Structure formats: structure tokens, C-alpha cells
Amino acid sequence: MLRTVFSRQAQLSGRNSAFAARSVLLRRLLHIETLTTPNDNALKYLSKDGELLQPRGSKSIVIKNTDKTLLEHSKLAETLFVQCPGVETVMIGDDFLTVNKDSMVHWNQITPTVIEILTAHLSSGAEAVSPEFKGVQEEKDGGYNINIPKFEYNEEEEEISELIDELIDTRIRPAILDDGGDIDYRGWDPKTGTVYLKLQGACTSCSSSEVTLKYGIESMLKHYVDEVNEVIQVIDPEQQVALKEFDKLEKKLSEKETSA
């Protein structure tokens, strides 16, 4: 009986050691490429070995360090925020992760830990978010449906909206994904011709995002769709507050320069 127990324990110990060795080997083999973005405070971490965080082609998931409800459904994001002070937002793509940081924190303080966490996550095979994540994200209390316009379309207007969505998905989104960002189509107003979009990831606080929006996306959509008159970015309440405070600061600095 004791021999059987000891034998079983030895087998289990051997299997555990083999599993641990395999995990270490996988971590060594996985290669994460760090890519710069147009935003100095955002970096893109790309899986180069075919390992995926989400099914290929999935819409990116954005989680802020203040999204306590969402963090309960993403161990990966929670770990990043806990172990990487200064990280403000993470965007989970299909084969990449975009990290937005506080401007006062240097990337040397963040990147090694991000790569270690991401490598461990990919080698574990765990899900980036729980199956319940999407439902929680869409709840009103999550803040993700705030400022999102709602439109009702007739058959012709529905076709136009679908064309805009298709153009964004096939012509615009791939280039934005390359830069560590993403774009979400939120609707087209048939009365005014206004297209509402949500920029995510590296695009969120990028100084060139307005240029991209107006001279890139807007120009292309107006070229292909006569019914489009302008493109407007939908921003979260937190971003609205931050922009207002930034405007106040710029105004004060301008007044000081004038008085001097």
C-alpha cells in the first residue's frame, strides 16, 4: 500500500516537474515584440509566435485602471495594473496588447514587467477576459454606453450605415491596428450626415488623433459615401473632464505669457 502511494506521488511529482519545465520552455520560446506608436505614452506589445489573446479579427477590448467591475473579469489586466504602477489603460487586441501609461513614468520601469506578464499569460493558455466580460462591459453602469448616439434607419439608410461600417473595418481599421490603436463605429446620423467613431488604445490621447480623424478618416469616408458630411469622435466622460482641465491650463499659461 505504501509503495503504491509513494509510486503515485512520484508519478505526480514527475508530471508536475514536466509541466513546470514545459511552461518555462514555452515562456522562453514565446517572443514579444515591442513596437512604438504615434503616441509617446503608448506602446504596442505584439505576439510573434501565433499565440492569441482573442480570436483572430476580434474587436479590441479597452480596460482602464479605474474599471473595478471589469477588472474582476480580466486577470491579465488586473495583474498588469497591480504590478505596473503608472499604467492607466490596456487595450487587448487579437495578437497584441497596447499599454497607455502616465506621462511621468518611463517605459524602462514598465516594459520588462509587461513582457513577463504577457509571456506568462500566453504560455498558460488562459482567457484574457471571462465569458461574462462582454455583458458586464455593455451594462450602463460600466460607462461604455455613455455618449453613444442611437439612430433608427429605414432600409436605404441601413445600407448606407453598413457601407460606412464596412469601409471602416476594411480600409481604416487595419492601419490603426498597426499603430497600436483601434476604431469602433458608433453610428451615422442620416439627418446631419455625421459619423460617430470611438478611437481606442494608442489613439486615445495621441496628439495626432484629431488629424487622423479629420484629414484621414473623414476625407476617405466623404470620398466613398456622399451622405457623409463629417466625422466626430465619441469620448468618455473622463476624457471630457481631462480635456476641459487641459484647456483651462492652456488658457492660464497663455494669459501669463501675454501679461509678461
Image (cartoon, rainbow, N blue to C red):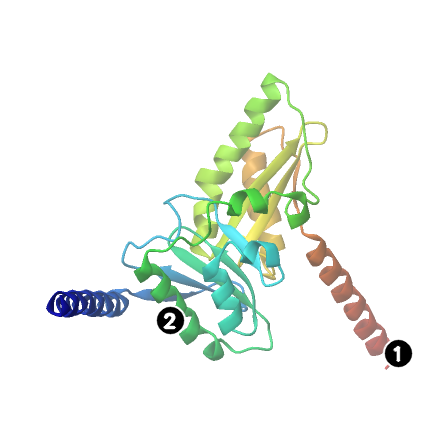
Q: Specify the farthest residue to the front.
A: 1
Position of residue 228 relative to residue 184, above or below, is above
Residue found 81% across the figure and 68% down from its top: 251
Residue found 42% across the figure and 74% down from its top: 113
SS for dot 1: helix
Q: Position of residue 248 (x, y in %)?
A: 80, 66
Q: Quadrant of residue 13?
A: bottom left
Amino acid identity at mark 2: Glu
Please give the residue where the numbered disc 2 appears in the rendered image: 116
Q: Nearer the viewer, residue 169 or 68?
A: 68
Residue found 77% across the figure and 69% down from its top: 250
Please give the residue where the numbered disc 1 appears in the rendered image: 259
Q: Nearer the viewer, residue 250 or 34?
A: 34
Q: Quadrant of the C terminus?
A: bottom right
98 lies left or right of 185 = left
Point out the frontmost of discs 1 and 2.
2
Residue found 63% across the figure and 18% down from its top: 154
Q: Quadrant of residue 203?
A: bottom right
The number of callouts visible is 2
Q: Position of residue 15 (x, y in %)?
A: 18, 65
171 lies left or right of 47 = right
Q: Position of residue 159 (x, y in %)?
A: 55, 23
Crowd around label 1: few <14 · some 14–19 · many ≥20 (10 Å): few
